[in-house]
Amino acid sequence: MKTILLLIVSNIFMNLAWYGHLKFKDERLWLVILASWGLALFEYLFQVPANRIGSAQWSVPQLKILQECITLVVFTVLAYILFRSPLKWNYAVSYVLIIGAVFFAFRF
């Protein structure tokens, strides 16, 4: 559970670093790059311990698949909050398929 919580926090920072700058399109590029790098530092402060802790019970591929699933959930929430981006049916189907990948990675 600790790994999952750390990955959620890490992904909040990651998605803000990757996409948050799109809210500031009038700012200079170098400034938003520096801001994104600053956010990425906090991403790594949570992501590295998450993977260290998680590797004690899961394989590296399992950790990666879990992280991708968490990323999609966090991204979907932030995309809606920041950009009012709706969840379309084809996105929902894609997410279900990715959740299926997580199931298969951890089940067998």
Image (cartoon, grey):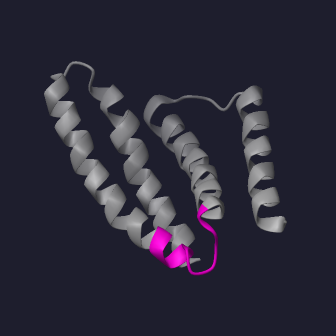
Quarter of the figure with residue 54: bottom right
Of 65 and 24, the residue lying toward us = 65
Residue at x-position 66% and y-position 62%: 62
Q: Position of residue 57 (x, y in %)?
A: 63, 79
Residue at x-position 55% and y-position 49%: 71
Residue at x-position 43% and y-position 52%: 12
Of 3 and 22, the residue lying toward us = 3
Of 59 and 101, the residue lying toward us = 59
| Residue 46 highlighted magenta (yes or no) | no
The N terminus, quarter of image:
bottom right
The residue sitting at the bottom extreme is 56
| Residue 53 highlighted magenta (yes or no) | yes
Quarter of the figure with residue 65: bottom right
The residue sitting at the top extreme is 26
Q: Position of residue 17 (x, y in %)?
A: 34, 42
Q: Position of residue 104 (x, y in %)?
A: 82, 57
For residue 4, above or below residue 39: below
Q: Position of residue 68 (x, y in %)?
A: 59, 50
For residue 82, above or below residue 1: above
The residue sitting at the right extreme is 108
**Magenta highlight range:** 51-60
